[in-house]
Image (cartoon, rainbow, N blue to C red):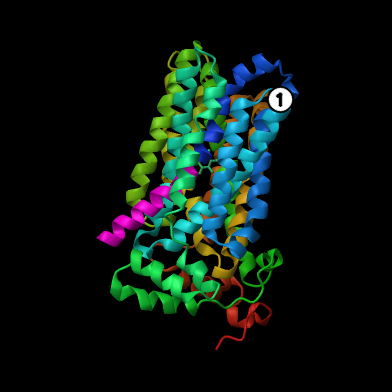
Amino acid sequence: MQQKNFLYLIAGIAALAGLLFGFDTGVISGAILFIKKDFQLTDSMTEYVVSSVLGGAFLGSLFGGKVIDLFGRKKILVLSAICFVLGSTVSALSQGAFELILSRFILGLSIGIASFAAPLYLAEISPPEMRGKIVSLNQLAITVGILGSYIVDYALAEQEAWRWMLGLGIFPAIALLVGLRFLPESPRWSLMRGDSETARKTLQTIRQADQVEGEMQEIASSFKLKSLGLSSLFSGWVLPVSLIAIGLSFFQQATGINTIIYYAPTILKQAGFEQEKMAILATLVLGVVNVAATIASLFLIDRWGRRPLLLVGIIGMSISLSVMGLAFYWKEVAWVSTLAVGGMIAYIICFAISLGPICWLVISEIFPAELRGVGASFATSANWMFNGVVAATFLTLVNRFGASGTFWLYATVCLIALVFIYFFVPETKGKTLEEIQTEMAQLGVGTHSITDDRSLLNDVT
Ligand code: BGC
């Protein structure tokens, strides 16, 4: 019991990184209106301010992989917390567009690092039967951060206090920095570096006494890969693993979640909520629904398993997007705004129980130990790239195909995602990370087994 409480405490601290991810990506949507006015930004400058975070997140996650494997899970989280403090402070005090773009880029770097390092750390410290729930605490924190940013934007809009909007992120960033001092290093990373003493000590604080030695042995016997470089992600049996992780990232973004998260007020205005205030209020409701449904998913993820939730969620997302498309198609009908909001709420619920948490969870579970850092970081950078592409193309798609056509397009992508998940995504519920690794290697995920692939093997004795 004591160990479990300590585990939850550790998870809560690490998940602050998720909260900052959610807050710092969400807060700009309200703040930008006033920044634009104050700094008299042109449209393209405005776009740079908004998208500098996505650029930073892409690079932070891409280059963080090597760092996390070399220096450890904890150190990279500390680096990300320092960047969060720095980025929030400078952006709140910015005197011009250049400073703002630079500081938002630094924030992006920290978001990029946090987005793969936090779930990976959580996966490595969790016992298998609780791993789904613990890793998904990070997704819960993301949704709380997004909701927090909506509330802050709403509350400070009248005063046009954009510096406070951006600056409030400093508090959770400092809390993360302080909290990280008390976190142990991941026992899996310590053991991989040959430090069995530290690994054992950590396991003794988060596992029952009789489980420690068994887990130590299981982890130690799983280190088989020789090469640690990025190229190993694309050779032998690891290639299909990488494709599954990148595929999940693609579908998490290409099914349109951030068109709702970033553009909800714009969509709602088109759907008949003429007053801005009402549109923003309805957006707040969506934020609350996102948090509530993510909480529900925490209770289902280790019971139902990843695959059933993904499949049910994706079918629901496809139906709700089709309904939203219909609502915009029947524009003249009186109850169209109700239909659009109903569709959006159902869509958010379905995302929050499926692709929201499970994409990050599976990415942190399926890579072999020696490639977990590089693999998760690469799949995460792909996630940020797809995120940027969807955000940058949404309004163009709406102009070209109308809102209905655009939502039907995302509904179709959901159907492709359904096929992908059904055939390729493995069930990882209740298995240790080492069991998952062995299974993926044995299946070769449909190709060949780890023992066939001499180029990737050490002389395992
Ligand atoms: C996604 C974000 C999204 C958020 C919404 C996360 O899992 O990666 O792109 O904004 O969920 O809750």
Q: Position of residue 356 (x, y in %)?
A: 48, 45
Q: Position of residue 81 (x, y in %)?
A: 54, 45
Dot 1 lies on which element?
A: helix
- Against 57, residue 30 (above or below) is above
Image check: 71 left or right of 318? right
- Against 42, residue 195 (above or below) is below
Q: Nearer the viewer, residue 228 or 160?
A: 160
Q: Quadrant of residue 1?
A: bottom left
Q: Main secondary structure of the magenta part?
A: helix
Q: Position of residue 193 (x, y in %)?
A: 55, 72
Residue lying at 35% horizontally and 52% vertically, measured from the top left: 9
For the C terminus, the image quarter is bottom right
Range shown magenta: 1-19
Residue lying at 46% horizontally and 24% vertically, measured from the top left: 152
Q: Nearer the viewer, residue 460 or 254?
A: 460
Q: Quadrant of residue 216?
A: bottom left
Residue 124 lies within the magenta run: no
Q: Residue pushed farthest bottom?
A: 461
Q: Is residue 393 visible?
A: no
Q: Position of residue 415 (x, y in %)?
A: 54, 46
Q: Nearer the viewer, residue 71 or 433?
A: 71
Can you identify the residue that label 1 sits on?
97
Q: Nearer the viewer, residue 200 or 31?
A: 200
